[in-house]
Amino acid sequence: MSTYVYGITAGSNPALPEGMAGVGEPPRPVRILKAGELAAVVSDAPEALRPKRRDLLAHQNVLAEVGAGRCVLPMRFGNLAPDDDAVTQVLTERAEHYHERLRELDGKDEYNVKASHVEEAVLHLVMAESPELRALAEANRQAGGGSYEERIRLGELVAAAVKAKEAEDSKEVQSLLAPTAAAVSVGVESTGWLLNVSYLVVRDSAEAFLAAAEHARKSFTHLDLRVNGPLPPYSFVEPGPLEPAGSTVGAGVDGK
């Protein structure tokens, strides 16, 4: 039977809550596999695993429980190994790498920040900032709406202005947040979002980071800015045999 891997931590840490259950229907019992000074948090893998909400939440809950008060290298949902021996073999072979990453990430959490434009607000803003757009809009209005070609031209210019504003806003928000983070990971482009960035934040600096995010929210009233965290540091674990780019099913539980 395949082994489902939730995360990796120091072997001296694990003490799972009694009866902890993970993915699967019925939920598979969560257990610890140790190899030297490392440990993997695992369960038996259910057959035909799919990214259903119950299992996504179960994966996240296991990491939250195990990660309370200790550093865990989180795996994304669906990370499978052929069996327990394969897991302990990788832990042994890559022990130095995992110890280094645990030291690097100890005491830090991930915060994912997404932002999109509030359509009506950004349209008002780009019109207010561009005398050319205002003049064209007024000319069309006085001409009873303008010709088809004039309306198309105005629409294209407005779309270009909004696109430029997206790049500008993304850069400015990142410049406000980056100084409060230990590391930054830019996420994949996603439809509807002009910003999708994860920040690795020292727990003692979380208040400063969240204050910077709130300042950005108040400064950019034409943005819908969302902060998700604290999360396990998914975006700051390099791909490897047991890391997020391994044998996975579906998307990460953080929804990125």
Image: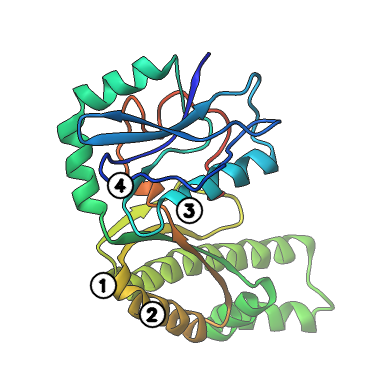
Tell me which numbered mark, 2 or 4, is placed earlier along the sequence: 4
Label pair 1/4, CB-CB below 8 angstroms? no
Mark 3: secondary structure:
helix
Tell me which numbered mark, 1 or 4, is placed earlier along the sequence: 4
Q: Nearer the viewer, residue 26 or 236?
A: 26
| Relative horizontal placement of residue 173, taking residue 159 as reference (left or right) | left
* Foreground label between 3 and 4: 4
Give the image location of residue 1, x and y in percent.
Answer: 53, 13
Q: How many marks?
A: 4
Is disc 1 surrounded by few (<14), some (14 to 19) or many (20+) residues within 10 Å? few
Q: According to the image, label 3 marks what residue?
A: 64
For marks 3 and 2, give the CA distance. Answer: 25 Å
Q: Does 254 sit above or below residue 212? A: above
Tell me which numbered mark, 3 or 4, is placed earlier along the sequence: 4
Instruction: Write the residue at 68% across / 42% down.
Output: 54
Q: According to the image, label 2 marks what residue?
A: 212
* Foreground label between 1 and 4: 4
Q: According to the image, label 4 marks what residue?
A: 13
Label pair 2/1, CB-CB below 8 angstroms? yes
Is disc 2 surrounded by few (<14), some (14 to 19) or many (20+) residues within 10 Å? some
Q: Nearer the viewer, residue 105 or 168?
A: 105
Tell me which numbered mark, 3 or 2, is placed earlier along the sequence: 3
Is disc 3 surrounded by few (<14), some (14 to 19) or many (20+) residues within 10 Å? some
Q: Amino acid at mark 4?
A: Asn
